[in-house]
Image: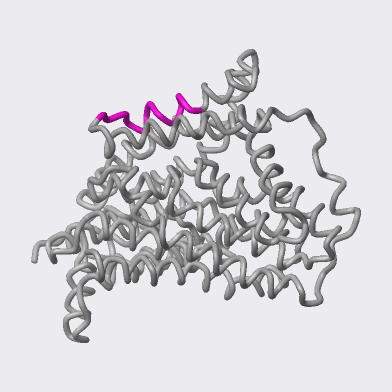
Amino acid sequence: MNYSFTTIGALLGLVIAIILIIKKVQPAYCLILGALVGGIIGGGGLSVTVSTMVSGAASMMSSILRILTSGILAGALIKTGAAQKIAETIVAKLGEKRAVTAIAAATMLICAVGVFIDISVITVAPIALAIGEKAGLSRSGILLAMIGGGKAGNIISPNPNTIAVSEAFGQDLTAVMMKNAVPAVFALTAAILLASALSKKSGEQITAADLESSENRELPSFGAAILGPVCVIVMLALRPLAGITIDPLIALPAGGLICTLATGNMKHIREYTEFGLSKVIGVSILLIGTGTIAGIIKASALQYDVTSLLETMHMPAFILAPLAGILMAGATASTTAGATVAAQTFSSTLLSAGVSGLSSAAMIHAGATVVDSLPHGSFFHATGGAVNMSIADRMKLIPYEAAIGLTATIVSTLMYLIFG
């Protein structure tokens, strides 16, 4: 074994970061400070600790570059009204009788084409509230449908978390997205079933006041709205289908430009790119902080100690993938940060144990959706605020959200056992 820091030091650093995040200190600074303290306590010394933190942050740069350029697509989809049009079309086609299914499916699709999950929920929320008020559905059921659909879409999207795990294992982004297609369907089904049951229970009712923030504007046609995302999917699919590689660094912003052009909004391109950058800059900075603590954890004895523990308990090595995703996402209250730390830390261990990189990436990614919405993260508050839900009521949804993420994780793990 060759490591620079002790397991205790790495874990203490992570705990310090978590406590500070809960205290609402800026998460990136929390992670950087936790990495510094963890490295020093872990016996690495100041010089080794800082160099390891810098190396860890540097390893994030390829992911950060792709995420920054993905902001062009996200900005175009949101500002042109394309995302809203996609959501409204799905809801209209499925109708009020299938309101929960429509809301979950709409959020899944918007997230799957490259809009961040919290933005996906915020985008669909005005439509969901309006249809929920007409259908007499509970606020909790509506929000769970959006969150569950978002989780299903997130594990098959070109979003920051998918980019991060594919980079960590050296896998093609499209392949990682498609690997969790079946788990995504199961997660969507679980979301619809749980949200449907919850929507019938008494709770906070949606009122006319909740609908006042709905934005009325002229939306593009569905064909124009969907063209950009379709082009992204086609470009990313060229590698596995035709051996033609178009990097996400090119495909994602190209999709944003196509969306802007198709909707007749090229004169607003500067505004849209600035808006898109504002949406991805936060997660990009978070990934820098994540990289520092991931570097410390990766260079610690943690992976060896966890592997030894699994061997002592006679558990197979592949269990490490979903377990790491679950624990790290819960610790950071972030799908992106959790998936990144887990993938960066345990990629070499999983690969040396004979677990394929593609399956490992998929299982970690699915696992990172189980308890990623805890109160010390922004997703918890952003989604609750989207439907004017109190913190107490928002807390009650966490077990349901975990069940949806766990469904995807179990199916992803079973697929590894069956297909490898």
> Does residue 205 appear in the picture of this structure?
yes
In the picture, residue 262 is in which quadrant? top right
Q: Residue at x 67, y 55 (%)?
A: 103
Q: Residue at x 62, y 57 (%)?
A: 104
Viewer-proximal residue, 232 or 382?
232
Residue 247 on the magenta segment:
yes
Please state if 337 lies on the left or on the right of 104 as rendered. Answer: left
Q: Answer above or below: position of 363 versus 57.
A: below
Q: Residue at x 82, y 69 (%)?
A: 204
Q: Against 34, is 248 above or below?
A: above
Task: Provide residue 292's location: percent of width, then percent of height.
Answer: 33, 50
Screen quadrant of the C terminus: bottom left
Taking 101 as reference, is 2 left or right? left
| Most common SS among magenta residues | helix
Q: Give x and y (percent) for residue 240.
A: 27, 39
In the rendering, at what x and y percent does residue 60 appear? 32, 42
Numbered range of the magenta stretch: 244-255
- Give the vertical position of 373 relative to 172 (above or below): below
Q: Hey, which residue is sitting farthest top in the picture? A: 267
Determine the image quadrant of residue 133: bottom right
Q: Quadrant of the N terminus?
A: bottom left
Horizontal placement of 389 versus 415: left or right?
A: right
On the image, the x and y values in percent for residue 177 come to 38, 49
Residue drawn at the location 48% of the way across and 28% of the way down:
255
- Pick the front one: 155 or 283: 155
Front one among 292 and 219 = 219
* Residue 206 belongs to the span the image colors magenta: no
**In the rendered image, is residue 381 in sight?**
no
Q: Residue furthest right?
A: 208
Seen as rendered, the residue at the extreme left is 1
Q: How many marks?
A: 0
